[in-house]
Amino acid sequence: MLRKKLLNPVRYGFYALILFSHKLLRRLVPIFLLILFITSIILSPHSAFYFGVSLAQASFYGLALASFALRNTRLGQQKMFCLPLFYCLANVAALVAIVKLLAGKRIERWQPQR
């Protein structure tokens, strides 16, 4: 948001495209995932493909929830559970940041306490 002028490909060329894809689109992934999940659920009664996609997504999110529920156990430490949880937590954090940004709340830098 602070460097919008750098997204001008006429002035900054390929750097503007790299900035757009690596910074802006990457931060919008949670919104794209929500849209994908909702549309695949809506379309699942009409196509076996969309049914499979929505089932795969629901299974992935189910693994993340199971990992969160079992996080203090040995089973919850397995990679099969930890990776979906990490991916989902990272995207939830990005979604919270998007909501705060749209609400006009300033995102401060995190300062570790010593």
Image (spheres, rainbow, N blue to C red):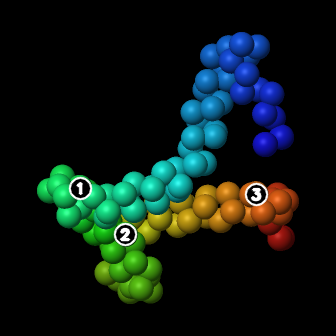
- Element under disc 2: helix
Which image quarter: residue 40? bottom left
27 w.r.t. 94: above or below: above
Q: Position of residue 98 (x, y in %)?
A: 67, 57
| Quarter occupied by the C terminus | bottom right
How far apart, in angstroms, are the residues tagged by discs 3 and 1?
32 Å
How far apart, in angstroms, are the residues tagged by discs 1 and 2?
16 Å
Give the residue type at disc 3: Leu
Q: Nearer the viewer, mark 1 or mark 2?
A: 1
7 w.r.t. 97: above or below: above
Q: Nearer the viewer, mark 2 or mark 3?
A: 3
Checking the image for residue 101, the label placed there is 3
Residue identifier under label 1: 50
Q: Earlier in the sequence, mark 1 or mark 2?
A: 1
Residue identifier under label 2: 61
Which image quarter: residue 108? bottom right
Q: Earlier in the sequence, mark 2 or mark 3?
A: 2
Q: With 86 as the anchor, is 46 left or right in this view?
A: left
| Quarter occupied by the N terminus | top right
Task: Name the residue rendered at 60%, 48% in the picture.
Answer: 27
- Crowding at dot 2, Cα within 10 Å, few <14 / some 14-19 / many 20+, comes out as some
Q: With 114 as the anchor, is 74 left or right in this view?
A: left
- Element under disc 3: helix
